[in-house]
Amino acid sequence: MSFEIGPLTVHLYGLMLALGAAAGVAVAYIEAKRRSENPEHLFNMALIVLPLGIIGARAYHVIDQWDFYSQNPEQIIGGAGLGIFGAIAGGVVGVLIYTYWKKINALRWFDILAPGLILAQGIGRWGNYFNQELYGYPTDLPWGIFIDPANRLPEFEEFTHFHPMFFYEFVLNITGFALLMIIGRKWRDRLRDGDIMLLYFIYYGVGRFILEGFKIEVWTLGGIPTARWITGAAVIIGLGVLWHRHRRLPPPADLDD
């Protein structure tokens, strides 16, 4: 879906992604200032993080849809479709590269970026709404979303309304954003650098693991949705690391002595 502004065509999918990215950067700027970090790093970091995030997102999508792209290799570069897990992986690599280069605390910057990241995900999901994609199985629930016949998946052409997966993820992400912002302030004296990012992985991992059960024709490994392998691992590792840091290590105050 798109609209015209003079000679310019604005695609709503891209517009929502851009708005999400802008909101994420704005939140990260606020968080950097709150933590007394130089926000200039944020804008310099973006020059590395955003391209690697886009490359990772595209790579994940292409692997996911390899049956199609193996027959249409000309669409691998420049085609539509992004995967959030690839975007996160690429972004993490970008942050690690930049923080190593500038010799600044990577874990601290992951915490600065995490709330803005999940907010950007939530806003960006509305792009899926305008493209009539990211919907689940048919439903007769009041909030089921109508999908045009041309956008219905094979074997589901006779159904009209489907689970609005984009909206479920929007609610998941916006709620997660609020939680991370509250936790980062209310328990700031008890948190270690990296805890907010761990909480992001745990929270989003649990939510996404559950939501995968509503999706149609997902990429699977061993009969299990690939996203569930990824999010399940993220939750287990995140909980393990968080437990170790707060139960097995001395309190942050003691480490500073």
Image (cartoon, grey):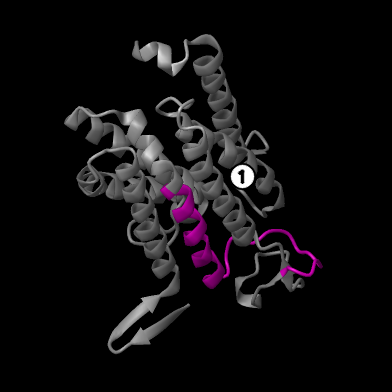
Which quarter shows the C terminus?
Answer: top left
Furthest residue in direction right, as rendered: 140
Count of marks, rendered view: 1
Residue at 52 percent across and 43 percent down: it is: 182
Q: Position of residue 181 (x, y in %)?
A: 49, 45
- The residue at 80%/66% (across/down) is 141
Q: Is residue 29 left or right of residue 139?
A: left
For this view, does 234 lie left or right of residue 107? right
The residue range painted magenta reads: 116-144
* Magenta region includes residue 192: no
Which corner quadrant of the image does residue 86 belong to?
top left
Which residue does the numbered mark 1 point to in the structure image? 208
- Taking depth in this image into account, of 7 and 168 the one nearest to the observer is 168
User: Residue 61: where, in percent of width, then height?
Assistant: 46, 50
Amino acid at pointer 1: Arg
**In the image, is residue 167 above or below residue 177?**
below
Give the residue at x 39% y 64%.
Answer: 19
Query: Which of the pair 10/65 is nearer the observer?
Result: 10
Q: Is residue 128 visible?
A: yes
**Vertical relation: 184 (above or below) 82:** above
> In which quadrant of the rendered view does residue 156 lie?
bottom right
